Every structure is written in C-alpha cells, then in structure tokens.
C-alpha cells in the first residue's frame, strides 16, 4: 500500500516506527497526529508504517524516523520528533521551498549506485558554518537539477571521511559512482555550480555523453567545436544502431578537439532544422553561418569522422600551397607526391 502511495502521491510524509520496542513512539504518534490536519491543508499526505522490513528496503535502518518524500525522493527529519511545531515548520518548508534532501548512509549508497550525477554535501548537525553553507547550496539546488545533478546532504562523519572530507562541511560530486572532491569555496554557490556542471567533470569516458537542454546550452557556449546527435528513444529503429556506430569514433573526435554529445529533445532538434531522427549536427563557435547537418549515412562512422574533421578545418580539404624550398623537402621525404604547378591561375603542369 505504501509503495503505491509513494508512486501516486507527490508530497508524502511517513513515520516509520516499531510498535513493540519503542518507548517514545506512542507519544510521538500523538504529537504528530496533532499536526495531521495542518499538513493536509498544505497538500502533504501523512501516514505511519510499522513494517520493519519495508523500512529497511527504503534505506531506513533506525526507527523511529520521519521521512518526507517528494516524487519518491526522501528527506529525513533530524530534529526532535516530540516538537510538533518544529516538525510542522520543517514539513511546510520541504513542501514550499527549494531544500536539499537530508539522507542517511544507506540511502546515500543506493543513490551513488543508481544516479548518474549526484552532489553530496557532508555537514555537521547544529553547526553554524554548516547551516550557512546549506543555505548557499540551496540557492543552486534547482540549477543543479536542470543539469541532471541531484543534490543531497548527509551528516555522517565516517562516510564523509571515506570520501575525503575529514572535517565537514565538504562537497563531493559522484559521476557514475566515482567521487570527485570539491576544493573550492563552499560559500560561493556560483563557483560550486560552475564546478559541478563543468563539462570535464560531467564527462563520461566510455560512451557519448547524454545531455539535457541546459547542459547543451552551456556546452554550446563553451565548446569551440561541438557535434550533437539528436535522437529519440521512442519509435526510432535506427537510433540504437547509429549510437553504437558513433561511439566507435567518440575518442577520435575528442582527440581532434571535437566535443561529441547526444540529446533526446525533438523540440530542440526542430529549432536547428532537424525534423527526422536520428540526425548529426556540427556546431562551430564563432561561425556566423547555421550549424551544419550531416547528410550522409550515419552508420558509416569513418566517413562521419572525416566529415567532422573537415568541418572543423575546411582547409584540410584544400591543396597545400608551397614554395620551392618546401617542395624540394617534400620530394626528398615523400614516397608518393602529386604536385600541381600553376601561375596566376593558369595551368602549367601536373604529375
């Protein structure tokens, strides 16, 4: 029943408890029932759960515990459960404001394993410095979400130390489970946001990086050369095959200075004249012309790589102009050489 509620109810608060072995649970329940009507007024559905096994499945290993779920994402209340007014204020704030979810180590481990991008603020409870930094980080929580980065906070010194934060507060970014510690100023949220969304920090080494619209816009403003595969997961028989083929040249493109990404956004594709998917589009920073759509076969990766390199530097496709000393050196060092002699656009000789 509770699992169904988590899927159906956007704002849900669950009181996990043990009815047989909890001296304070009856009193806590009585206090929480005093604010049940108030939470209803704010669109927060309040339930209780005595199922230890389900609690453990949800990462709740210590009871009693009060957990607020918003679109299935948990935030654990770390205050006094007998203080009903403080609990109510916390719940309303979770509902109405942009807050960073508070989780425990069990939920953290699950999120590290499941989330592509996860930012974790390790903090100290009842600490002025931590409280101030949390306020700074909450200002960029929504921006992080726009880039596909989930931000949470954890008060666990042992786990913080495991990930390199010996003296919390500290920020760690997990990319596909791999931690990167932030060494910048935690009081400067804009600097932290720039670091979290930096292309090299979000980059995936083993596949073409998937981006959303906000990430694409940032890459477009920062990348000199950008190749974008527009695709869709729905009703596209060729997309998987094309992706597999293009991933063969991802490293070569990167070596040539061309950033390669993919995006599932049909509306954005239409803005660049792409109406049939999949499609490959090349963007060149500072180029006043329109982005260039690849017109060839997307399942021939080598030809695509040649095309990308040629778009980066069209001069590579031109006959090199050399003087006499350079020509002599080329003749001496080349096994095979074709030379076109010309003067004032008049053909003289070719061999």
Image (cartoon, rainbow, N blue to C red):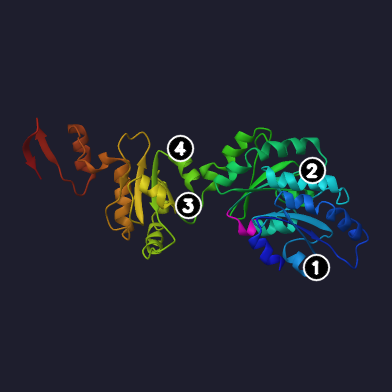
In the picture, which quadrant includes the N terminus? bottom right
Q: Nearer the viewer, residue 203 or 275?
A: 275
CA gap between label 3 and label 2 equals 35 Å
Q: Considering only order in the chain, which callout, 2 or 4, is on the residue closer to the N terminus?
A: 2
Instruction: Give the magenta-colored segment's residue range.
Output: 112-116
CA gap between label 2 and label 1 equals 28 Å
Q: In the visual, does 351 lie left or right of 241?
A: left
Q: Position of residue 190 (x, y in %)?
A: 60, 34
Say which residue label 1 marks: 52
Proximity of marks 2 and 1: CB atoms separated by less than 8 Å: no
CA gap between label 1 and label 4 equals 50 Å
CA gap between label 4 and label 3 equals 16 Å
Which of discs 2 and 1 lies nearer the camera? The answer is: 1
CA gap between label 3 and label 1 equals 40 Å
For disc 1, the neighbor class at 10 Å (few under 14, some 14 to 19, many from 20) is some
Q: Position of residue 35 (x, y in %)?
A: 82, 51
Which element carries disc 1, helix, strand or loop? helix
Proximity of marks 4 and 3: CB atoms separated by less than 8 Å: no
Outermost residue, top side: 344
Residue at the spot 68% in from the left edge and 36% down from the top edge: 136
Q: Considering only order in the chain, which callout, 2 or 3, is on the residue closer to the N terminus?
A: 2
Residue 124 circle label: 2
Say which residue label 4 marks: 222
Q: Nearer the viewer, residue 284 or 150?
A: 150
């Amino acid at each position: 029943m509770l699992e169904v509620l988590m899927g159906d109810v956007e704002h849900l608060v669950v009181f996990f408890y043990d009815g047989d072995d909890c001296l304070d649970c009856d009193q806590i329940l009585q206090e929480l029932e005093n604010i049940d009507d108030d939470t209803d007024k704010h669109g927060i559905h309040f339930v209780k759960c005595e199922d230890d096994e389900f609690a453990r499945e949800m990462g709740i290993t210590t009871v009693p515990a009060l957990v607020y779920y918003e679109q299935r994402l948990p935030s654990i209340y770390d205050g006094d459960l007998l203080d009903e007014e403080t609990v109510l204020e916390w719940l309303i704030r979770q509902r109405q404001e942009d807050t960073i979810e508070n989780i425990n180590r069990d939920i953290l481990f699950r999120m590290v394993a499941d989330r592509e991008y996860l930012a974790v603020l390790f903090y100290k409870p009842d600490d002025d410095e931590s409280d101030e930094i949390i306020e700074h980080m909450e200002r960029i929580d929504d921006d992080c979400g726009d880039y596909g980065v989930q931000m949470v906070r954890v008060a666990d010194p042992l786990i913080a130390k495991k990930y390199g934060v010996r003296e919390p507060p500290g920020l760690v970014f997990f990319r596909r489970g791999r931690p990167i510690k932030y060494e910048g100023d935690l009081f400067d949220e804009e600097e932290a946001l720039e670091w979290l969304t930096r292309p090299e920090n979000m980059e995936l080494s083993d596949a073409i990086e998937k981006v959303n619209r906000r990430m694409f816009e940032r890459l477009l403003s920062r990348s000199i050369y950008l190749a974008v595969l527009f695709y869709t997961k729905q009703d596209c028989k060729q997309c998987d095959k094309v992706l597999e083929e293009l991933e063969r040249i991802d490293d070569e493109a990167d070596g040539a200075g061309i950033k390669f990404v993919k995006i599932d956004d049909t509306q954005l594709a239409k803005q660049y004249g792409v109406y049939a998917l999949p499609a490959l589009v090349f963007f060149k920073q500072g180029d006043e012309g329109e982005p260039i759509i690849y017109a060839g076969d997307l399942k021939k990766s080598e030809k695509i790589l040649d095309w990308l390199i040629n778009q980066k530097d069209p001069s590579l496709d031109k006959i090199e102009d050399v003087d006499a000393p350079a020509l002599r050196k080329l003749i001496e060092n080349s096994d095979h050489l074709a030379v076109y002699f010309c003067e004032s656009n008049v053909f003289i000789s070719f061999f």
